[in-house]
Image (cartoon, rainbow, N blue to C red):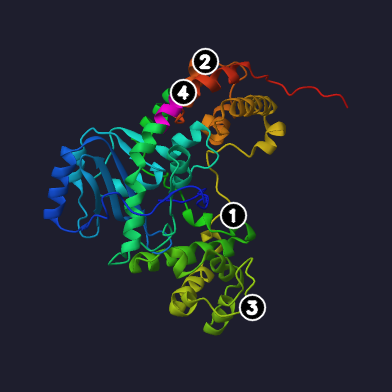
Amino acid sequence: MSSADSPPPASDVPVLTEPAEGVPDVIQSERALVAAAEAIAEGTGPVALDAERAGGFRYGNRAYLVQLRREGSGSFLFDPIAVPDLSPIQTAIGDAEWVLHAATQDLPCLAELGLHPTALFDTELGARLAGLPRVGLAAVVENYLGISLAKEHSAVDWSTRPLPEPWLTYAALDVELLVQVRDAMYADLAGQQKLELALQDFAALTHFTGPPVRTDPWRRTSGMHKIRDRRAIARVRELWLTRDRIAAANDTAPGRVLPDYLIVVLANLAPTTPEALRAAGASERPASRSRARIAHRGIERHAEEWLSAIRRVNELTDRQLPPATVRNDSPPPPRVWADRDPMASARLTYVREQLTELSEQRTIPLENLITPDTLRRALWGAPKTLDESVIRTQLSDLGARQWQQDIVTPLILEAPTTAPVTDE
């Protein structure tokens, strides 16, 4: 569970430190799993769910702890390493509404365990639509219930076994009040006439399977913009792929094998001997104030793999090198629209201005009214004469919900097709 935007507990706000019914035992056997499923099936109302991952420590995004709470059933902690198939829980939940905070973080790893929502309420997304200034779980709980949650274990290594008792307390608290928050937020959204649009967004999340798979993910290496030479680009690719193989084989986060900044350093310097590799690996991390110049442990531990990757690139012909840039179907940056498509630029400027004003009036973040990428794709290359049904279909194909179409479509239709004339 992310603790982003969570403020430190205020001195006059009570802090919840223990679940009301205590911390449940972690379920690690099929027998306990079946018993939990039976208890959950006997409960009533929505089901609060959360998952803890080990990002930054392990390879991939799997869950290492799943928390669940339901009225009339109580709270449950599941160890998905010991019981990797939670389909009995799916059966027990049935069509009951899930309540999650920041659902897109947890839905993919829950799906790997056999858990799929048919109805969903996301308290983070709901908080954004409700206009809350901070949307971390602790801030949302405090806003609606006047209680603060301690969040000191949000970035720990959840693959640790056995899990320490304080971590389990933290995990259980994440679902302790989630349904109460949901109920208060539901009333708030209804009072602001935002409930229907929130429910549309929540319904869309039931089909969320994860971020899109990227072509050439190695091109997103941090610091890649510093490299222009195609052979150095090829070194980034080979070093990135080598790192990924090592990380997968060792179930370790890639950044712990070799940080991105060192991939860029090695790609630029192209060391070919252990001594040169060690010297390159001791390069100071960007923005670091440390005076120590000790090679990252991954440099020494996998020295031959890095040198082999560099040698493989050195043996490539120029024709085998990857292109410096790749084309995609994304519109160009808006800064060049005025020169390349003045009509699209005029429309984009107008719609942005109107949406910014609407965002302030309705206290809904601009990116929730419509994602910037969706708006750009809808406007770039569009004909001068537009048809409402065509616009709505295009927005729908891009993932815009009905309420977003209702807001954006009229703005696009009334947008000017030429830039306003200004007095010099």
Depth-wise, is mark 2 or mark 1 nearer the camera?
2
User: What is the tally of numbered marks visible in this picture?
Assistant: 4
Q: Amino acid at mark 2?
A: Glu
Query: In the rendered image, which quarter is residue 195 located in?
Result: top left
Query: Relative to residue 95, is residue 223 depicted above or below?
Result: below
Q: Residue 107 colored magenta? A: no
Question: Does 114 sit left or right of 228 as displayed?
Answer: left
Element carrying mark 4? helix
Q: Nearer the viewer, residue 289 or 394?
A: 289
Which residue sits at x=47%, y=71%?
309
Q: Residue 300 location, x and y as percent? A: 47, 80
Q: Which residues are magenta?
A: 185-194
Q: Which residue is mark 4?
A: 191
Q: Earlier in the sequence, mark 2 or mark 3?
A: 3
Question: Does 367 sit left or right of 415 as displayed?
Answer: left
Q: Amino acid at mark 3?
A: Arg
Q: Residue 79 location, x and y as percent? A: 24, 57
Q: Residue furthest left?
A: 31
Q: Residue 133 location, x and y as percent? A: 55, 39
Element carrying mark 2? helix
Depth-wise, is mark 2 or mark 3 nearer the camera?
3
Q: Earlier in the sequence, mark 2 or mark 1?
A: 1
Q: Which residue is mark 2?
A: 388
